[in-house]
Image: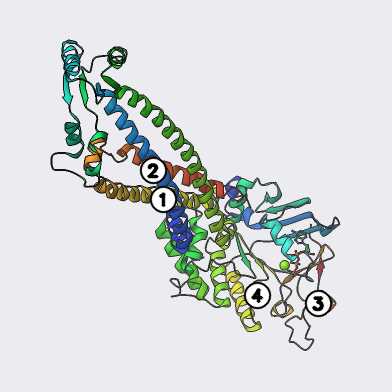
C-alpha cells in the first residue's frame, strides 16, 4: 500500500493488544478487526422511558471487508458506530477492536483508539477556516509525526481522493462533495485499521453519492476495512456486498442482496424498477 | 509544541477581533493597576527622601521682636545636633517658592502675608527622631514661635498615606487578577464555542486532551502578556506627558521627582499577565471534558 514505508509509529492502543493490524503476521490477519459480542445499548431518555437500541448484537468484521450497515431511521446505525469509536459506551457485552475491548478503555486511551480508526460523517466535519491540507494533516499531527512526513502523506491522501492541487484551498470554499473528499482523505491518511462511515452520502445528491461510494470502494480495494452505514438503498444495490440489517435492536447479517426483506426498513421511496446487481440467493448468518 | 503554537497562531488570527477586544479589556485593567503602583512607588520614593533629610522649619509670629528671633538663631547655632541655621524673611520665603525669575504668574498673586518668616534648621542625618522632637518641643514653647514643622510629621503622614495607597493597590490588584481570569476565561469559552468544529475534529482524530487544550492556554498567555505590555506602554506615555507638563517649581518645592515603575515591577506585571492569562485559558477550558 502506498506510504506503508512511512507508517506512523505503533500507538500504545495497539502495542498493548495485538500487533500492528495492517502489517500483522498470519495470525493477526485472520483475527477479525471488529467483533460485537452480545452488545446491548440502552438510552435513558429524559421522559423516563428506556430505549433499547441494541438488544444483543453479535457480529464480526474481518480484515479487508466492506460491510454496509443499514436499517430504518432510528434503528441504531449511528449508535453502533458510536460504540466503536467510544462516543457511547455499551451497557452489556463486548466490542473488540483489534482484539481489545473498547468498552473497557479508560478515557485517556480513547484517543489511541481513534488514531486507529478513520471516521467519516454525513456532515463532513471539516474545519472551514483551515486549508484542505491542514484538515487532512491534523490526523497525523496528533501522532506527532515530522512535518516532512506529514506533508508527503497528506499530499498522497489528497491525491487519492481526487483533490490533487487543492491542498492550499480553504476547506470552507469547497463544494459538499469536495468537503466529503477532504473528510475521507483525513480518515485514510493515517492508514487506520478500520474506516467507519456514518451516512457519508446523506448530504449529497444521488450522482455525487455514487461517486463517494466509488471512492470508498477504491479505498477498500487498496486494502482498507470499511464499515459503511446508510439507508440509501441505491447504494446497497450497486454491488453485492455484505449487509448488516439493523432492526428492532438486532442485526441480521445478509451476505448480499435484500430481496427477501420487505422494503419497509428503508425510509426512502423504493424504486422497484431500479436495476439490482444482486443475483445470488441471500444467505442469513448469525455471527457470534 | 510547535504544532500547538501554530494552531494558537491560527486561532488568534481567525478570531482576531475577539482576542483584540480581550487584550484591550486586559490592558484597561492593567492600566488601573499600573497607575496605582505608580502612585505607591512615588509615595515611597518621597517618603524615603523626606525621611533622610533631617529638617525643621520654625515658623515665627509676625509680631516677634527681631531681638528674640536673633536670640533663638544664636541659641540654635550652639546645639551640636543642628548643622545649619538660616533665617528666612517673608520675602526670602516668597523668593524660594517663586525662584529668582518670578515663576508662575498665578502664584505671584499670593499675598506677602501667606509667607511667614521662619528659621530653617538642618539636623545632622545621624540625629534620631526623638532628639529632633525634643528640640522641636522646646522651640514650640517660645513666645516668638508660631509653630514648628518637621518633615518627621510629614514623613509619618506620608507613611500612612503610603500604607493606604499600598492597601488600595493590593485591593485593585485582586480585582484586576479576578478580571483577567474572567476576561480570558470567557474569551476562551467563546473562542471554544466558535471553534467547536475544530475541537470536534481534534477529538475525532484522536487528539489527546492536552493537544486540544494547549493552544488555548497559549492564546490566554499571549493575551495576558500583550494586555499587560500595552498597559505599561500606555502608562509610560501618560507618565511622561504628565511629567513634562508638571510645574517644575511646584515639583521642586515638594521635593517631588516622579519616577516611572522600576523595570522589575514592569516585568512582574507582564509575567503576571501571562500567568493569569494561562490560568484564565485553562479555566475557560474547564467544561471541555474528555470525549
Ligand atoms: N444520546 C441519546 N440519548 C437518547 N436517545 C438517543 C441518543 N442517541 C440516539 N438516541 C435514540 O436512539 C435511537 C437510535 O439512534 P441512531 O442515531 O443510532 O439511529 P440511526 O439508525 O442512525 O438513524 P438514522 O438513520 O436516522 O441516522 C433513536 O431513536 C434515537 O432517538
Ligand atoms: Mg444515524
Which quadrant of the structure image shows residue B135? top left
Q: Residues within 10 Å of mark 1 (few under 14, many from 20)?
A: many
Query: In this rendering, which labeled residue sits more in front, label 1 or label 4?
Result: 1
Residue at coordinates 17% horizontally, 36% vertically from top-left? B95
- Subunit under mark 4: A
Give the distance between the C-alpha atoms of the residues marked 2 and 4, in whole angstroms. Answer: 58 Å
Query: In this rendering, which labeled residue sits more in front, label 2 or label 1?
Result: 2
Q: Tag 4, which secondary structure?
A: loop
Give the distance between the C-alpha atoms of the residues marked 2 and 3, in whole angstroms. Answer: 83 Å
Quadrant of the rendering where the C terminus of chain A is positioned: bottom right
Give the distance between the C-alpha atoms of the residues marked 1 and 3, in whole angstroms. Answer: 72 Å
Residue at coordinates 45% horizontally, 68% vertically from top-left? A155
Circles 1 and 3 on the same chain: no
Query: In this rendering, which labeled residue sits more in front, label 3 or label 4?
Result: 4
Q: Earlier in the sequence, mark 2 or mark 1?
A: 2
Residue B34 marker: 2
Give the distance between the C-alpha atoms of the residues marked 2 and 1, in whole angstroms. Answer: 12 Å
- The residue wearing badge 3 is A281
Amino acid at each position: 500500500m502506498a506510504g506503508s514505508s512511512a507508517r506512523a509509529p505503533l500507538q500504545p492502543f495497539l502495542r498493548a493488544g495485538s500487533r500492528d493490524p495492517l502489517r500483522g503476521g498470519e495470525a493477526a490477519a485472520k483475527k477479525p478487526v471488529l467483533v460485537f459480542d452480545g452488545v446491548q445499548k440502552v438510552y435513558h431518555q429524559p421522559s423516563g422511558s428506556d430505549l433499547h437500541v441494541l438488544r444483543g448484537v453479535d457480529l464480526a468484521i474481518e480484515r479487508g471487508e466492506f460491510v454496509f450497515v443499514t436499517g430504518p431511521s432510528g434503528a441504531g446505525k449511528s449508535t453502533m458506530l458510536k460504540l466503536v469509536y467510544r462516543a457511547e459506551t455499551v451497557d452489556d457485552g463486548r466490542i473488540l477492536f483489534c482484539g481489545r475491548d473498547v468498552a473497557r478503555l479508560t478515557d485517556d486511551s480513547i484517543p489511541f483508539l481513534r488514531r486507529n480508526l478513520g471516521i467519516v460523517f454525513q456532515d463532513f466535519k471539516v474545519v472551514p477556516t483551515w486549508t484542505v491540507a491542514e484538515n487532512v494533516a491534523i490526523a497525523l499531527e496528533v501522532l506527532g509525526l515530522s512535518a516532512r512526513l506529514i506533508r508527503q502523506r497528506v499530499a498522497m491522501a489528497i491525491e487519492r481522493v481526487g483533490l490533487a492541487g487543492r491542498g492550499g484551498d480553504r476547506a470552507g470554499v469547497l463544494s459538499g462533495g469536495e468537503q466529503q473528499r477532504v473528510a475521507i482523505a483525513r480518515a485514510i491518511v493515517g492508514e487506520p485499521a478500520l474506516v467507519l462511515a456514518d451516512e457519508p452520502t446523506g448530504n449529497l445528491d444521488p450522482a455525487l453519492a455514487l461517486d463517494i461510494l466509488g471512492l470508498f470502494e477504491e479505498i477498500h480495494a487498496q486494502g482498507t476495512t470499511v464499515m459503511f452505514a446508510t439507508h440509501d438503498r441505491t447504494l446497497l444495490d450497486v454491488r453485492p456486498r455484505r449487509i448488516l440489517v439493523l432492526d428492532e435492536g438486532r442485526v441480521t447479517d445478509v451476505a448480499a442482496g435484500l430481496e427477501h426483506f420487505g422494503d419497509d426498513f428503508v425510509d426512502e421511496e423504493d424504486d422497484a424498477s431500479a436495476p439490482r446487481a444482486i443475483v445470488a440467493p441471500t444467505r442469513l448468518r448469525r455471527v457470534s | 509544541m510547535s504544532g500547538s503554537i501554530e494552531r494558537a497562531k491560527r486561532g488568534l488570527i481567525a478570531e482576531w477581533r475577539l482576542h483584540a477586544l480581550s487584550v484591550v479589556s486586559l490592558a484597561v485593567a492593567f492600566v488601573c493597576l499600573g497607575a496605582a503602583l505608580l502612585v505607591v512607588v512615588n509615595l515611597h520614593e518621597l517618603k524615603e527622601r523626606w525621611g533622610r533629610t533631617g529638617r525643621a522649619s520654625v515658623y515665627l509670629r509676625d509680631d516677634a521682636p527681631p531681638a528674640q528671633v536673633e536670640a533663638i538663631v544664636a541659641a540654635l547655632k550652639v546645639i551640636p545636633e543642628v548643622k545649619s541655621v538660616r533665617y528666612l524673611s517673608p520675602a526670602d520665603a516668597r523668593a524660594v517658592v517663586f525662584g529668582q525669575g518670578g515663576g508662575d504668574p498665578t502664584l505671584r498673586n499670593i499675598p506677602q502675608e501667606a509667607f511667614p518668616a521662619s528659621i530653617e534648621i538642618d539636623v545632622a542625618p545621624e540625629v534620631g527622631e526623638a532628639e529632633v522632637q525634643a528640640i522641636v518641643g522646646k522651640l514650640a514653647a517660645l513666645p516668638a514661635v508660631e509653630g514648628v514643622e518637621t518633615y518627621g510629621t510629614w514623613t509619618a503622614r506620608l507613611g500612612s498615606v503610603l500604607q493606604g495607597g499600598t492597601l488600595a493597590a493590593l485591593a485593585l490588584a485582586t480585582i484586576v487578577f479576578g478580571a483577567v481570569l474572567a476576561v480570558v476565561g470567557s474569551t476562551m469559552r467563546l473562542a471554544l464555542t466558535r471553534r467547536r468544529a475544530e475541537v470536534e475534529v481534534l477529538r475525532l482524530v484522536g487528539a489527546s486532551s492536552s493537544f486540544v487544550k494547549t493552544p488555548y492556554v497559549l492564546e490566554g498567555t499571549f493575551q495576558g502578556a500583550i494586555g499587560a505590555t500595552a498597559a505599561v506602554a500606555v502608562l509610560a506615555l501618560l507618565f511622561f506627558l504628565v511629567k513634562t507638563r508638571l510645574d517644575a517649581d511646584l515639583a521642586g518645592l515638594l521635593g517631588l521627582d516622579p519616577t516611572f515603575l522600576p523595570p522589575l515591577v514592569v516585568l512582574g506585571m507582564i509575567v503576571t499577565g501571562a500567568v493569569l492569562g494561562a490560568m484564565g485559558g485553562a479555566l475557560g477550558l474547564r467544561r471541555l471534558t474528555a470525549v
